[in-house]
């Protein structure tokens, strides 16, 4: 297997796509806060739009894997990026209609996000083995950078031009910058047809990985979706919320790259466990006492770092456990299990916030959502540490 060469072109192309794909998801909090300020819909409903979008990554995992195999990497890239850009542009005519936003930014953007995520998560593994973690980390790191840039850009554009024109400019930018990148995409290996390997459910390693990662998706979107609202509750300017969200995304990018590289040093399962532990500590020990800007910045950096590590290590964990040929099938099965967490994780936090008085009740109203997110992250880390234990025992048994 080659280590580099054209693989770095693939990494660069996938990075540009993920810049807008996951980056757009992680900057939704800016739109959510602005739309909530205009009383378009409650916080929990607006959070549900962002959650619906990213939940298509899970709902469509197996279907998108088959479509990518049928169309090829390049065509799949063009289709996915067209849908993401079109959904943003169409959202510009739905800024006063929450139902329209569910269709445009929830479903259309969600379908494109699902295809591009599956494509960019698995394609670099065809070109790398020893440096697979670094390659995946670079690709996922670009999504963190994208979230940071888009958060600041959207806040500026909304102030200057309004929400509708912000959607249009983001959509046109997606088409202009991702289409050239899609041209360079190509498969090195013939992808396995994504299906359901029922025998995997008899493998305790897979079961624990699937359960652990599924539980871990519930809290992932809570901080980026609610940080702008939380800063409003502290009495800080809206620009502070966008800057903190940008800091979160930059930290997430660094976490994706760092934990991706760490996979090549101490193993992907250990790296994933460490990322979850960092996330849990930030949610349970720092955010609940962040009543001023300084501790909130510390929380934002640490949680973004651990959050990014989760995403960049999962593809490497799957490839490490089941090999590059089976990675598409196994990864799509794992992703399918993320549907509930992606769809309900942030809305549940929104419902908890509303139940305890809403964003206008001060930071105390946020604490139930914080503890909900932190406890689930602890549970996720427990399952992944269980996978690590089973893998260690398996190696000992094999060498015995």
Image (cartoon, rainbow, N blue to C red):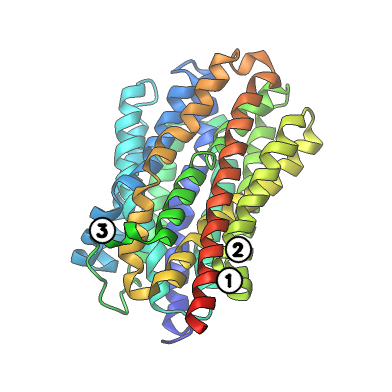
Q: Residues within 10 Å of mark 3 (few under 14, many from 20)?
A: few
Q: Quadrant of residue 360?
A: top right
Query: Which mark identifies residue 86?
Result: none
Query: Which mark identifies residue 198?
Result: 3
Q: Residues within 10 Å of mark 1 (few under 14, many from 20)?
A: some
* Residue receiving disc 2: 271
Q: Is residue 209 above or below residue 356?
A: below
Q: Quadrant of residue 228?
A: top right
Residue 294 visible here = yes
Q: Nearer the viewer, residue 153 or 323?
A: 323
Which of the two discs, 2 and 3, sits closer to the camera? 3
Looking at the rendered structure, the secondary structure element under dot 1 is loop
Q: Residue at x 32, y 65 (%)?
A: 328
Q: Position of residue 218 (x, y in %)?
A: 49, 39
Looking at the rendered structure, the secondary structure element under dot 2 is helix
Q: Nearer the viewer, residue 315 or 199?
A: 199
* Residue receiving disc 1: 267
Does the CB distance between marks 1 and 2 fall below 8 Å?
yes
């Amino acid at each position: 297997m080659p280590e580099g060469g054209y693989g770095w072109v693939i990494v660069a192309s996938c990075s540009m796509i993920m810049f807008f794909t996951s980056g757009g998801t992680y900057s939704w909090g800016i739109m959510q806060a602005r739309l909530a300020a205009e009383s378009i819909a409650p916080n929990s409903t607006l959070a549900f739009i962002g959650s619906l979008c990213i939940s298509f990554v899970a709902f469509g995992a197996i279907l998108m894997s088959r479509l990518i195999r049928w169309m090829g990497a390049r065509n799949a890239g063009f289709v996915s990026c067209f849908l993401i850009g079109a959904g943003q542009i169409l959202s510009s005519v739905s800024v006063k209609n929450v139902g329209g936003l569910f269709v445009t930014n929830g479903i259309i953007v969600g379908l494109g996000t699902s295809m591009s995520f599956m494509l960019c998560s698995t394609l670099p593994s065809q070109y790398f083995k020893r440096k697979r973690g670094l390659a995946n980390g670079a690709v996922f790191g670009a999504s963190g950078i994208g979230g940071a840039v888009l958060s600041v850009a959207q806040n500026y554009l909304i102030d200057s031009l309004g929400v509708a024109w912000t959607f249009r400019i983001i959509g046109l930018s997606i088409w202009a910058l991702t289409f050239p990148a899609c041209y360079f995409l190509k498969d090195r290996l013939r992808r396995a047809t994504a299906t359901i390997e029922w025998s995997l459910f008899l493998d305790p390693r897979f079961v624990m990985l699937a359960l652990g990662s599924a539980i871990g998706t519930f809290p992932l979107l809570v901080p980026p979706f609610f940080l702008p609202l939380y800063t409003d509750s502290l009495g800080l300017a809206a620009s502070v919320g966008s800057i903190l969200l940008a800091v979160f995304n930059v930290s997430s990018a660094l976490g994706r790259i760092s934990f991706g590289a760490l996979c090549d040093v101490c193993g992907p399962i250990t790296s994933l466990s460490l990322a979850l532990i960092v996330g849990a500590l930030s949610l349970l020990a720092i955010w609940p006492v962040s009543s001023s800007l300084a501790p909130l910045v510390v929380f934002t950096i640490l949680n973004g770092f651990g959050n990014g590590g989760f995403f960049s290590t999962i593809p490497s964990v799957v490839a490490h456990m089941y090999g590059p040929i089976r990675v598409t099938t196994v990864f799509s099965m794992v992703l399918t299990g993320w549907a509930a967490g992606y769809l309900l994780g942030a809305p549940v936090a929104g419902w908890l916030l509303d139940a305890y008085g809403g964003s206008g009740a001060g930071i105390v109203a946020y604490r139930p959502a914080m503890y909900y997110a932190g406890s689930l992250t602890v549970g996720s880390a427990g399952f992944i540490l269980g996978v690590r234990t089973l893998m260690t025992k398996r190696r000992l048994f094999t060498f015995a």
